[in-house]
Image (spheres, grey):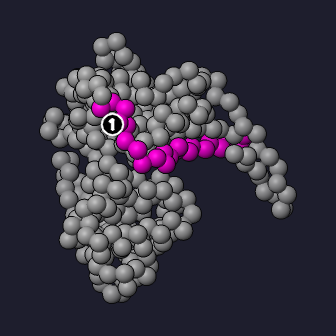
C-alpha cells in the first residue's frame, strides 16, 4: 500500500521506513495495546517452561488471555508456534493467572477466565503466502496482522482475514494425540455461522439486512466472539450484536462510571425520538459500572431507524 501526502491537490509519496528490530515493533504495540486492540497489557517477555512469550495481554470483553508474537522476517510457522503457545497456556493456567494477579490491582480466579476464547496474534511487517494460507480456516485461534511505518510518524496496521469456510479439524481429526486436536478440545473460536445458526429464519433475514447496510460504511470490520458479533470502526466498537433463538438485539456501549458516579470521557448519549432503546448496566469488581443502550430489532421495517441510532455511535468514533 502506497501512502501519499496531499498538498494543494498534488500527491507526494510518503516513503516506508523499516523496523530495525522486532523489539521496535514490540515496544510500539505494547505502549499502545489498548488503543490498537482494546486489550489490557499484562507483561512482556514472559517465560513459561522452555518458551518465552513476547507479550501477554488480557481481553476484558471476552475474559480471555491473548499472546502476541512479533516477527521481522518470514521464517516462522504460524500453526506450529501458535498451537505450541496455546498448549503451554492450557497446561499452565495457574501461572498465567498468577502473572495477571501480580501485575494488576484486580485479581482473577481460574473460573473468571474463558479459556475457550484464548488466542495468539502474530504481528510482522509482512507475511508470505504460506503463512496466510496456514490460517485460512474458519476456526483457527490465531490472527495475522501486518504493521508498516512511514515517514512523518505514520503507522499502518492491517489484519489478514481468512476467507475459507473449511475447518482445521479436518487436518487433525485423524490424530487425536496431535497438539491441534488437544488444543481444539478446549479452545473453540466462534464463527459467524455459529451465531447465525441459532436464529430462526426470520431473524436470519434481519441479520443479513443489517450486515449488508453496515458493510457500506468505511473503515468497517466485524469481530466475532463467543457471545456476540461486534461492528468496529477503526478497531473501535460501534455496537454488539447478540444472537438468540427468539431475540436479535443490538447493544451500544455508552461508557463507564466510577464509584463516585463520574462518567468516563466521551460518555455517549443517544438521540432516540421513538424511545425504543432501553438502558443496560453491569458492575465490575473494581466498583466501576458499564452502561449501554439495548436496541431490540424485531422486523425489517425497523432497519432504517436502527441504522439511524447506530450511525450516531459510528459518527462519534474518530
Q: Residue at x 19, y 25 (%)?
A: 94
Q: Is residue 129 above or below residue 139?
A: above
Q: Is residue 17 visible?
A: yes
* Label 1 sits on residue: 169
Side of 293 relative to 31 (left or right) = left
Q: Residues within 10 Å of mark 1 (few under 14, many from 20)?
A: some
Q: Residue at x 59, y 34 (%)?
A: 129
Q: Is residue 103 above or below residue 307?
A: above
Q: Quadrant of residue 109?
A: top left
Q: Position of residue 303 (x, y in %)?
A: 40, 79
Q: Residue furthest front?
A: 174
Q: Is residue 123 visible?
A: no
Q: Position of residue 184 (x, y in %)?
A: 28, 34
Q: Residue at x 46, y 47 (%)?
A: 164
Side of 67 relative to 242 (left or right) = right
Side of 282 relative to 40 (left or right) = left
Side of 109 relative to 178 (left or right) = left
Q: Residue at x 42, y 23 (%)?
A: 81
Q: Quadrant of residue 40?
A: top left
Instruction: Please state which of residues 47 and 77 is positioned toward the viewer in this rendering.
Output: 77
Instruction: Please state which of residues 202 and 145 is positioned toward the viewer in this rendering.
Output: 202
Q: Position of residue 169 (x, y in %)?
A: 33, 36
Q: Residue furthest top?
A: 50
SS type, badge 1:
helix
- The reply to whether the magenta stretch includes residue 164 is yes
> Magenta part of the protein: which range?
151-173
Amino acid at each position: 500500500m502506497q501512502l501519499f501526502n496531499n498538498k494543494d491537490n498534488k500527491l507526494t509519496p510518503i516513503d516506508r521506513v523499516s523496523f530495525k528490530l522486532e523489539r521496535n515493533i514490540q515496544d510500539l504495540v505494547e505502549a499502545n495495546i489498548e488503543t490498537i486492540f482494546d486489550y489490557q497489557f499484562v507483561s512482556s517477555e514472559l517465560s513459561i517452561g522452555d518458551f518465552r512469550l513476547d507479550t501477554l495481554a488480557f481481553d476484558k470483553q471476552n475474559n480471555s488471555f491473548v499472546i502476541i508474537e512479533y516477527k521481522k522476517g518470514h521464517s516462522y510457522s504460524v500453526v506450529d508456534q501458535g498451537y505450541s503457545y496455546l498448549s503451554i497456556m492450557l497446561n499452565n493456567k495457574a501461572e498465567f493467572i498468577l502473572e495477571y494477579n501480580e501485575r494488576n490491582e484486580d485479581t482473577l480466579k481460574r473460573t473468571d477466565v474463558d479459556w475457550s476464547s484464548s488466542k495468539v496474534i502474530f504481528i510482522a511487517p509482512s507475511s508470505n503466502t504460506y503463512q496466510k494460507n496456514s490460517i485460512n480456516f474458519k476456526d483457527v485461534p490465531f490472527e495475522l496482522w501486518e504493521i508498516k511505518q512511514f515517514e512523518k510518524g505514520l503507522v499502518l496496521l492491517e489484519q489478514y482475514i481468512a476467507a475459507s469456510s473449511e475447518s482445521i479439524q479436518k487436518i487433525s481429526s485423524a490424530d487425536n494425540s496431535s497438539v491441534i486436536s488437544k488444543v481444539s478440545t478446549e479452545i473453540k473460536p466462534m464463527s459467524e455461522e455459529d451465531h447465525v445458526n441459532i436464529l430462526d429464519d426470520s431473524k436470519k433475514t434481519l441479520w443479513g439486512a443489517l450486515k449488508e447496510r453496515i458493510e457500506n460504511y468505511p473503515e468497517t470490520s466485524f469481530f466475532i466472539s463467543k457471545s456476540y458479533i461486534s461492528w468496529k470502526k477503526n478497531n473501535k466498537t460501534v455496537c454488539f450484536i447478540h444472537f438468540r433463538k427468539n431475540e436479535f438485539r443490538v447493544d451500544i456501549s455508552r461508557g463507564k462510571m466510577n464509584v463516585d458516579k463520574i462518567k468516563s470521557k466521551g460518555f455517549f448519549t443517544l438521540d432516540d425520538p421513538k424511545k425504543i432503546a432501553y438502558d443496560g448496566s453491569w458492575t465490575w469488581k473494581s466498583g466501576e459500572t458499564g452502561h449501554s443502550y439495548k436496541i431490540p430489532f424485531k422486523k425489517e421495517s425497523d432497519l432504517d431507524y436502527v441504522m439511524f441510532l447506530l450511525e450516531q455511535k459510528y459518527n462519534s468514533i474518530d
